[in-house]
Amino acid sequence: MSTTEIQSYLNRAQQDLLAAEQILQDGFYHVTVTRAYYAMFYAAQALLISRSVRRHRHAGVLSAFSEHFIKTELIETEYAKILANAFNARLGSDYDVMYSVDPATAKGVLQDAQKFIDRVKDHLDQMGNK
C-alpha cells in the first residue's frame, strides 16, 4: 500500500469532481454525470489500494468495493448503490445517444459523488491512510 498512490487517486477524484461542477454550470449534463462517476471510481480505487487490492476495470472496481467494504460493513450499503447508480448513468451518458440527462439528474449524481468521496476520505482518515 502506498499512501502517495492513495493520495494521487484522491487528488484525481477531487479534480474530476471540480470539473463536474464546472461542467454542470456550463449545461453539459451528460458530461457532468461522466465526470462525477469517474470521481467516485478514483475514490473507490483509493480505498481498494488501502487494502492492497488492485482492479482496473470498472466492473472489477465495483465488485471489489462491495466485497472488501460493503460486505465487511466497513462502508454503508448506500454507497454501493450510489456507485452502481452512477456507473449505470455513466454508461447511458457515454454510449447511448438517446439517453437523456436532465439538470436535476446531473446535479443529483454530482451530489452523490461528493457524498461518496467524503465517506471515502472519512474511512481513510479513520484507518490512518491519508
Image (cartoon, rainbow, N blue to C red):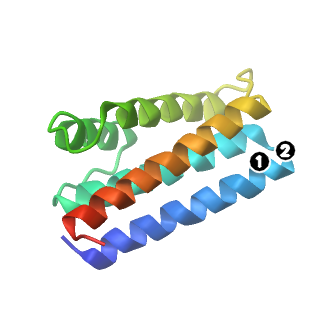
- Image position, residue 11 (x, y; %): 48, 70
**50 sits left or right of 107 in the view:** left
Q: Secondary structure at mark 1?
A: helix
Residue shown at the point (31%, 72%) measured from the top left: 130
**111 sits left or right of 128 in the view:** right
Residues at badges 1 and 2 in contact (C-beta under 8 Å)? yes
- Image position, residue 8 (x, y; %): 41, 72
View extreme (right): residue: 26
What is the spatial separation of the Cα atoms under label 1 and label 2, in whole angstroms? 5 Å
**123 sits left or right of 82 in the view:** left
Q: Quadrant of the N terminus?
A: bottom left
- Give the residue type that dot 2 points to: Gly
Residue shown at the point (20%, 64%) measured from the top left: 127
Relative height, residue 69 to residue 19 (above, below): above
Q: Residues within 10 Å of mark 2 (few under 14, many from 20)?
A: few
Residue shown at the point (16%, 60%) measured from the top left: 52
What is the quadrant of residue 16 in the picture?
Answer: bottom right
Q: Give the residue number, with chain letter if any, for mark 1.
A: 24
View extreme (bottom): residue: 4
**27 sits left or right of 58 in the view:** right
Residue shown at the point (37%, 73%) measured from the top left: 7
Q: Residues within 10 Å of mark 1 (few under 14, many from 20)?
A: some
Q: Give the residue number, with chain letter if any, for mark 2.
A: 27
- Image position, residue 118 (x, y; %): 45, 55
Report how many numbered discs are placed on residues in the image: 2
- Image position, residue 98 (x, y; %): 74, 20
Disc assigned to residue 97: none
What is the quadrant of residue 66 in the picture?
Answer: top left
- Give the residue type that dot 1 points to: Leu
Q: Secondary structure at mark 2?
A: loop
View extreme (top): residue: 98
